[in-house]
Image (cartoon, rainbow, N blue to C red):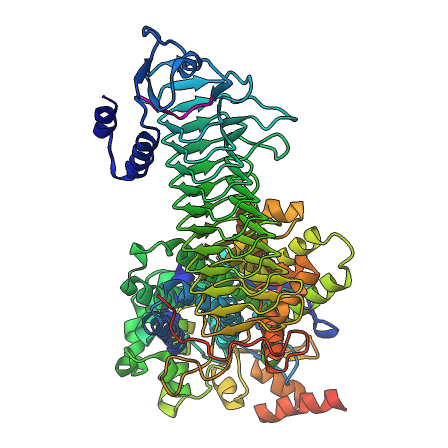
Amino acid sequence: MLKILKYSFYDLMRSRWSYVYFLFYLLLGTVLLFLNNDLSKAIITLMNVIIVLVPLIGTIFGVMYYYNSKEFTELLLAQPLKRNAIFLGQYLGVSLSLTMSLVLGIGIPFILYGIFRSDSIWNFSLLLVTGTFLTFIFTALAFNISLSNENKIKGFGYAVLLWLFLAIIYDGIFLMSLLLFEDYPLDKLSLIGTMLNPIDLSRTLILLKLDISALLGYTGAVFKKFFGTNFGLIISILMLSLWVFIPMLRIIFKSKKKDF
Amino acid sequence: MITIQNLHKTFKKNSVLTGIDLTINSSGIYAILGPNGSGKTTLIKSILGMVVPTQGTIHIMGENIKNNWHYKKNVDYLPQIANFPNNLSVKELFKMIKDLRGNTQADQELIELFNLAPFLNKKLGNLSGGTKQKVNIVLTFMFNSPILILDEPTTGLDPISLIRLKELIRKEKTNEKTILITSHIMSFVEEISDEIVFLLEGKIYFRGSIAQLKSQTQQPNFEHAIASILKTSYA
Amino acid sequence: MYIRCIRYRITKFQKFLITILIIGIHTTASYSNTLIVCKTCTHQTITETVNTAVAYDTIIIKKETYKEYNIIIDKPLTLIGKNYPTIDGERQGEIITIVSDHVTIDGLFIINVGTSYTEDYAAIRVKKSKDFVIQNVVLEKLFFGIYLEKARDGKVYHNKIIGDAVEEYNSGNGIQLWYSKNITIEHNFVQRVRDGIYLEFSDDCLIKNNVSSHNIRYGLHFMFSNKDTYEDNTFEKNGAGVAVMFSKKIKMSRNFFKENWGSASYGMLLKEINDAEISENTFEENTIGINIEGSNRIQYTKNNFINNGWAIKVRGACYTNIFVQNNFLNNSFDISYNSKLNDNIFNNNYWSKYTGYDLDKNGIGDVPYRPVKLFSYIVNRTPETIILLRSLFIDILDFSEKVSPVFTPDKLLDHHPLIHKIE
């Protein structure tokens, strides 16, 4: 697996898209920091961008990589290699190279700006951790979609739909149901609703850092426990790990049974 | 070397292989033929473990291939469509496959044979289809495995490379290897193969030498012989 | 001897004290003595010394622990503790009660005030007196700390009040003013009591440079008190921040309100307040920066609202409030309104969420800023929806509301938002 990972990582590190993605973050980070000169505002803006963009790029890139390397994958399948190794290797290769573009692209301008000497270092690390989680989650989901769909167009369609659903539609439905059942105690429901969507989940992580003052304005006991202690942070990180782990398991399971 | 028993494969509702029994015990060149959709590729992929059979067993060199990947070190495969990671160079690809399968020196000779030296440092994404196929061929022949499976090996090759390929296949035959080939080019098949396995609607319709086929169909010409099988089956 | 004693203790901030005492000497023209209290001295208890002293005497209390309470000071006296002698009230009741003018208390450590549900026992009470000074006093294990009852023209300076209050009903306030006038409360540290500083019916007071934190209820609490000023104070991590209620003409400037968290918590609560000035304060990381109910004619200038849940929450009818040149930085919600805009004005503020442009480069955005978001309405209605804060869907919702306001007051605009924040 490590060999496959190594080569798909090499391959992607030299792909034009990795550079475009890297340059995009580099530019965004630089513009936000050096034109505004406001570190915390730059981090907030980046969080808003990352939460939407990373899942989109993760899914699209994952699906694209899978379909583009289909023939090569077949060649690999004929080699004395475990199937798991091939797909997990490719998956990790894609995720790692995307993460690297993200971390370097954002990291360089922030380091130049002097993030290590500021107290925003925790918010900044959280930003990178969230971005990394989202990359791994959505690339895994993309591999799941492409493993289940032979048809490239269909696969792309589902990938975009998945993103659209989790990034926007889900929250719409979520909001409607909260408004609909507003007469009932909702704090558990709203927390569960959040856990079931990785984008919402990473948003909570960000809320915990940036909006704790507002969140503590709510009276519910469950809310208070969740947001007022480290409980929320731990649960969120655990759930995000599950969101990586379960799609990965499905990649293993699916790839074992699949015909090529 | 290859033993296939009662092999069935159904994709969703589409039965592609419906009971194949095939035993190949000796070295030689075996052409797997059949009309489109007869199950040639599925059969090959089943042998390679890329397709999971619905029913039946396959043994390669005495090993059952189910949930087993070690046997693949005895098989070299030339896929139909050559497509590699676009951003790796030819050299890196060779290095990678050697890294995965173990080292070999045979690639130098093959690179010379197919004139690939000028392309070694080029990215795979920038190569023409024919050159990619040559790279593909080198990848396949550089390991000295007892079984070779070639899926449409002639695709995109210029005449000189085609001659080289034929020489290569013959050479491997003299090395006591078992070679399975699928091809649409009948002249190529006629020229090179020792035995034919003809698939029709998921079953083996005919197995034997070209001479046997000609006499059975009473056709003087190989292409016509094949055509006559199809005609009778469609009639 | 009296003069020498005072002189060698002179520090800059005690000039006030000297003035009072000198005036005292001149007006009464009496002769004054210094009495010393210690276990081996002629005077062994404070109570007895106070009783034997005559007006304008100075009592020096040496470092010992005195188990006394109900010390009543009924003549002009100066009590000075050397190296913080302890007065332990053993929870029996009130410890020092001042019922005379011109009394100074300096440098005592007072502990164990009695707790009662019927009597408001205090460590030091000033009753119907004026021209007093209470300074350098440390209070611990108290019920009420310093209680000024119908007192005037006094000073409470540089005291430290550390309570251990847990519940509101059985705890008292750190510094309490009741029907008092013209009091200066400066440089005190008050923590872990019910209300840090509480003013009821007290006018013309100055509250300056105090730090009031970790109190169960309010850091500072005004009720029916007018023309008071509080400035340069820090209010941190109090149960509910600072409450200003039913009062007029209060000036609040350069105070620091921080981390007042909770469902009914805010940096500052304004309730039925008229004609106040609120300027150059900083509100940081409070659930609500300022909560405003029924308050009119208030000027909000040059305040900083940083990382609050709600910078300003307006409930009920408020008229003629003016918000000018404030910084709104990274608050979850800038303004929440659940009534009409009425004639409140927002102008020339800096909003970190502003996304407009400034083509003529005059430092003022060319597009008005709309500080009330649709989402803040939704959260007011269904609080749990707060979990959707910063979601793309909500952003889209807010954007469409911004383009054509339906739910939010369409006239609530800052017509001239600043491009750069005010330093």
Q: Position of residue C115 (x, y in %)?
A: 58, 23
* Residue C77 part of the magenta-drawn span: yes
Q: Position of residue C222 (x, y in %)?
A: 55, 47
Q: Magenta-highlighted stretch: main secondary structure? A: strand
Q: Position of residue A147 (x, y in %)?
A: 59, 68
Residue A235 visible here: no
Q: Nearer the viewer, residue B81 or C50?
A: C50
Position of C407 with respect to A52 (left or right) is right
Position of A164 with respect to C141 (left or right) is right
Q: Toward which corner of the image does residue B104 lie, by quadrant?
A: bottom left
* B33 shown above or below C256: below
Q: Toward which corner of the image does residue C35 lie, by quadrant?
A: top left
* Residue A238 part of the magenta-drawn span: no
* C175 shown above or below C139: below
* C402 shown above or below C170: below
The stretch in magenta equals C73-81
Position of C14 with respect to C213 (left or right) is left
Query: Which quadrant is home to the N terminus of chain A?
Result: bottom left
Q: Toward which corner of the image does residue B125 lie, by quadrant?
A: bottom left
Residue at point 56%, 36% (across, down): C194
Query: Which quadrant is home to the C terminus of chain A?
Result: bottom right
Q: Nearer the viewer, residue C255 or C384?
A: C255
Q: Position of residue A174 (x, y in %)?
A: 69, 64
* C272 shown above or below A232: below
Residue at point 52%, 86% (across, down): B190
